[in-house]
Amino acid sequence: GFLGYTKVANHQNLVEGMLKNFHILETRMSIKLHYLYSHLERFPENLGDLSEEQGERFHLDIRTMEERYQGRWDAHMLADYCWSLKRDCPQEPYKRNSHKRTFVHD
């Protein structure tokens, strides 16, 4: 299994089994699990590379997403989070101008 930054050879099977069991129990998964599942193929090479600062940033980003979507978890939320990461890369040129939208009503 997982303990801190230690992994076993069958980590992919463990994560897939856990997600399958959550689905059977109709448990609402956190965005972190959706993100892990969506990037499972990259997980082994990144294991242990997350700094405290990156972890803090991730939690702040997720809190912002939770406020925007008011606790509803779905694929659109994950896509929005991934695009927000892409938009934060200043070296990437944009082909189109983005229109700023807000999802939180005042």
Image (cartoon, rainbow, N blue to C red):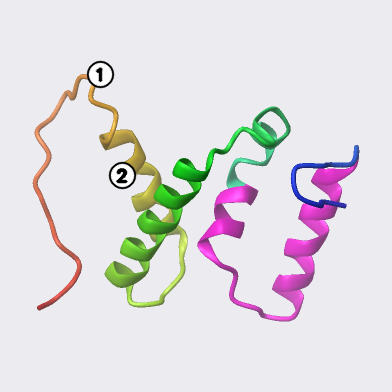
Q: Nearer the viewer, residue 104 or 26?
A: 104
Residue 104 part of the magenta segment: no
Q: Residue at x 28, y 68 (%)?
A: 68
* Cα–Cα gap, marks 1 and 2: 14 Å
The residue stretch that appears in magenta: 10-37
Quarter location, residue 64: bottom left
Q: Is residue 17 left or right of residue 68?
A: right
Q: Position of residue 88 (x, y in %)?
A: 27, 35
**Label drawn at residue 101:** none
Q: On screen, 16 above or below 40?
A: below
Judging by the rendered image, the residue that carries numbered circle 1 is 91
Q: Residues within 10 Å of mark 2 (few under 14, many from 20)?
A: few
Position in image of residue 105 (x %, y %) = 13, 76
Dot 2: element: helix
Mark earlier in primary sequence (1, 2) = 2
Classify the position of the C terminus by image quarter.
bottom left
Which residue is most to the right? 9
Q: Position of residue 49 (x, y in %)?
A: 61, 32
**Image location of residue 17, percent across then percent down:** 82, 59
Q: Nearer the viewer, residue 100 or 45?
A: 45
Determine which residue is flagged by label 2: 84
Q: Amino acid at mark 2?
A: Ser
Question: In the rendered image, which quarter is residue 18 located in?
Answer: bottom right
Instruction: Tell me what residue is drawn at x 36 percent, y 54 percent.
Output: 61
